[in-house]
Image (cartoon, rainbow, N blue to C red):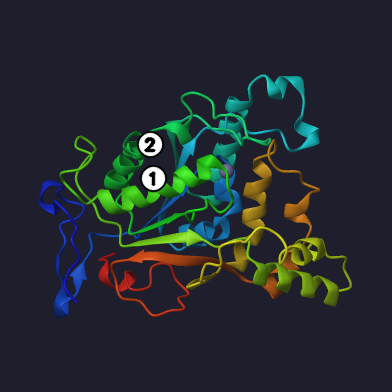
Amino acid sequence: MSCVHLGHAATAPAQQAPSSGPAGICSLGDGPLRLMAVHAHPDDESSKGAATMAKYVREGVDVLVCTLTGGERGDILNKAMDRPEIRADLPGIRRAEMAAARDILGVRQRFLGFVDSGLPEGDPPPPLPDGCFALQPLEVAARPLVAAVREFRPHVMLSYDENGGYPHPDHIMTHRVSVEAFEAAADPDRYEGCGDPWQPLKLYYFVTFHRARFAALHEKMLEHGLESPYAERLADDPSGPPRPNWEITTYVPCSDYYGIRDQALLAHATQVDPDGFWFSCPVHIQREAWPTEDYHLARSLVDTEKPEGDLFAGIREKVRL
Ligand SMILES: [Zn+2]
């Protein structure tokens, strides 16, 4: 296989310089392996792919979370946190929560500076607020992410599918800017002034809340004589709105890190009810019933065999660590 295009390596000395290694194996820059997770709001990183990130960080992978908005329009979803002093500075509180979750997961994290669009509710829904992330032209919305990709030089990117995972306008926009950055970051003629070109090798979509997983958790809870919170969700599915059925191409074993994932989620105290849905299935049951976090490989510039058990399959052996 030939080397994939890595852009203007010669202009970025020391750290990259792709070259043919022994036996014609491409070197895709010096290590460590790098993983970038692109999210809409603070807390999304802890509810989608958090155990995966915790695992890779502890294996020496450099992980950067890019958070497109500050989550300024999020509701307070935890009654215990719904207090005047919290409401008075929700953006500041959410930044502090994000910092705590970041440290628990062990990742790096960066806000990309857009303003939360809020979740419009009503029929018809109200217009989105002026200046919010979802109303930005694509080139404006993608620019900070393209710059981050060129600076961090991820081998693998994670983001949402084209429906956003769920139909929040910021999640849909996050999908669009992720695809745009994946496709444009290597092109020296696009996004000038955003750094030297870099081509990530794989783009995955999170497949987190899928029926097979909920069914497995449900069965295992019943087996242990516990009341399952999933019955309604499973029963509703056939008549509910059609959900995209993404093929799971990649199952990342990470159940040892479910505890860390939950700690990170709890750090987003305004957004997560500790007695709510997220924590209704004991971790030991989750480990038995569904020990992986799951992904759909949406783009790949390397050869790989499906199903995969590693986000870096097809890449790992080509990077000089
Ligand atoms: Zn979100």
Instruction: Give the vertical position of 81 relative to 180 (above or below).
Output: above
Q: If the picture is divided into quarters, which one holds ligand 1?
A: top right
Residue found at the far left of this picture: 10
Tag 1 residue: 177
Q: Quadrant of residue 300?
A: bottom left
Disc 1 + disc 2, Cβ < 8 Å: yes
On the image, the x and y values in percent for residue 53 come to 50, 57
The answer to whether residue 108 is seen in the rendering is: no
The three-letter code of the residue at mark 2 reads Ala
Quick one: label 1, few (<14), some, or many (20+) residues within 10 Å? many
The residue depicted at 52 percent of the width and 67 percent of the height is 246
Instruction: Give the vertical position of 114 relative to 292 (above or below).
Output: above
Tag 2 residue: 141
Instruction: Give the vertical position of 157 relative to 210 (above or below).
Output: above
The answer to whether residue 250 is seen in the rendering is: yes
- Residue in front for this viewpoint, 245 or 64: 245
Of the image marks 1 and 2, the number of the one nearer the N terminus: 2
Label 1 residue near ligand 1, CB within 8 Å: no
Answer left or right for 247 relative to 276. left
The residue depicted at 19 percent of the width and 44 percent of the height is 196
The three-letter code of the residue at mark 1 reads Val
Q: Secondary structure at mark 2?
A: helix
On the image, the x and y values in percent for residue 44 come to 57, 47
The residue depicted at 15 percent of the width and 44 percent of the height is 189
Picture disc at residue 45 = none
Answer left or right for 71 relative to 199. right
The answer for how far apart the CA atoms under marks 1 and 2 are is: 7 Å
Q: Total of numbered circles in the picture?
A: 2
